[in-house]
Image (cartoon, rainbow, N blue to C red):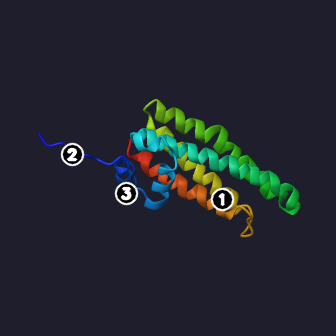
């Protein structure tokens, strides 16, 4: 019997090869100490945590923009609602679904996070101060969705 040594990062690399953004995927998963020992469900949960963190960061940015850019109040209100939906509905739905072994509902939550970010961005009519954050959310959502789909 031959024993083959597999490097700790290999599950991350193998999994990330199946996503639309290999480098982003590897970077996000390697930045979390749970990544090296996680299975596919665990990797999906790590990425959902990243979505949650980016959502919180974006909400903080939105709150700061109310003072700096009061003329954008209407669009900021819409974005605030959208990102609160991600934080209070989409993320918990995805975590619960994956934790309970029902990844289809987890996929729905992850997809919706990207949709909410897109709608937020569209509300600024091309002059969004949140473009880099919303693009990041879309990219992370796409990577996370690809991993959640591996669980279906």
Which one is earlier in the sequence, the residue at label 2 or at label 3?
A: 2
The percent position of residue 117, horizontal first and vertical second, equals 64, 55
Residue lying farthest to the top in this orientation? 100
Residue 21 visible in the picture:
no
Disc 1 + disc 2, Cβ < 8 Å = no
Disc 2 + disc 3, Cβ < 8 Å = no
Q: Which mark is residue 91?
A: none
Report which residue position mark 2 lands on: 4
Residue lying farthest to the bottom in this orientation? 126
The alpha-carbon separation of the residues under discs 2 and 3 comes to 21 Å
Which one is earlier in the sequence, the residue at label 1 or at label 2?
A: 2
Report which residue position mark 3 lands on: 17
The percent position of residue 42, horizontal first and vertical second, equals 45, 39
Disc 2 residue crowd, few under 14, some 14–19, many 20+, Cα 10 Å = few
The percent position of residue 94, horizontal first and vertical second, equals 53, 39
Which one is earlier in the sequence, the residue at label 1 or at label 3?
A: 3
Q: Is residue 99 above or below residue 135?
A: above
Residue 79 visible in the picture:
yes
**Label 1: element kind:** helix
**Label 2: element kind:** loop
Report which residue position mark 1 lands on: 133
- The residue nearer to you, when weighing 146 against 14, is 14
The quarter of the rendered structure image containing the C terminus is top left
The percent position of residue 63, horizontal first and vertical second, equals 80, 51
- The residue nearer to you, when weighing 118 against 68, is 68
Side of 46 relative to 63 (left or right):
left
């Amino acid at each position: 019997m031959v024993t083959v040594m597999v490097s700790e990062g290999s599950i991350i690399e193998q999994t990330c090869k199946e996503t639309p953004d290999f480098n982003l995927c590897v970077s996000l998963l390697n930045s979390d100490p749970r990544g090296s020992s996680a299975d596919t469900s665990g990797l999906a949960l790590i990425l959902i945590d990243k979505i949650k963190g980016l959502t919180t960061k974006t909400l903080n940015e939105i709150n700061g923009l109310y003072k700096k850019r009061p003329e954008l109040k209407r669009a900021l209100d819409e974005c605030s609602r959208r990102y609160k939906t991600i934080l209070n509905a989409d993320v918990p739905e995805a975590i619960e679904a994956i934790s309970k072994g029902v990844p289809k509902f987890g996929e729905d939550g992850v997809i919706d996070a990207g949709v909410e970010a897109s709608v937020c961005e569209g509300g600024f009519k091309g002059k969004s101060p949140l473009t880099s954050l919303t693009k990041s959310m879309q990219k992370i959502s796409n990577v996370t969705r690809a991993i959640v789909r591996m669980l279906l």
